[in-house]
Amino acid sequence: MCIKTFRNSVSPYKDHELSKQEILHTFGLNEIGMVKAVVGRNRESVIEDFYYQYELLYNEVTSVFPGILKLIVTATLVTRAAGAGELDTEQAYHLSDLYIRECENTQDIDALHSLTYTMVVDFATRTGSRKLRAGRN
């Protein structure tokens, strides 16, 4: 929903339709920061369109599987922490995207909790390994 909302509201102000990858690179920022990251002019209009599109699409969503929001919030936090821990930004966003896509296919709460745990351990291991290879603790 967020990707579709962002694409629908921002693409008319760009010279092309934003790709999923371009949109994912803005994740972790709030909606104003996301808009600023990709639009030079007409930011206020884009933000107004974003909120309008969000309301339209929100009404299409009937319910969210309980653990999905927790995983998405956790993915955002570990992606930011991994970046601060010197994990390559592209790798961190790619990992986050992989785990979020996997969570979209999960309909069992226990499997979702397990996926969240695995994601956190994966990010921590990769960040820690990178620091160790660099000779830092």
Image (cartoon, rainbow, N blue to C red):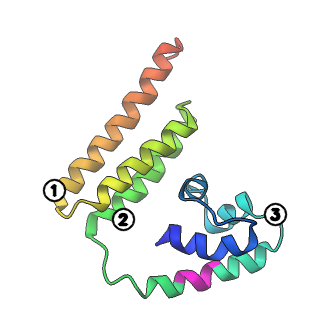
Residue 23 in the image: state x and y as whole percent: 58, 59
- Asked if 124 appears above or below 108 in the picture, the reply is above
Judging from the image, what secondary structure is the residue with disc 3 in? loop
Judging from the image, what secondary structure is the residue with disc 2 in? helix
CB within 8 Å, label 2 to label 1: no
Report the label total. Answer: 3
Residue 39 in the image: state x and y as whole percent: 76, 64
| Precedes in sequence: disc 2 or disc 1 | 2
| Residue tagged 1 | 110
In front of the other: label 3 or label 1? 3
Residue 53 belongs to the span the image colors magenta = yes
Q: Decide whether the magenta segment is chiefly helix, strand or loop.
A: helix
| Precedes in sequence: disc 3 or disc 1 | 3
The span shown in magenta is 50-54
| Residue tagged 3 | 40
117 on left or right of 127: left
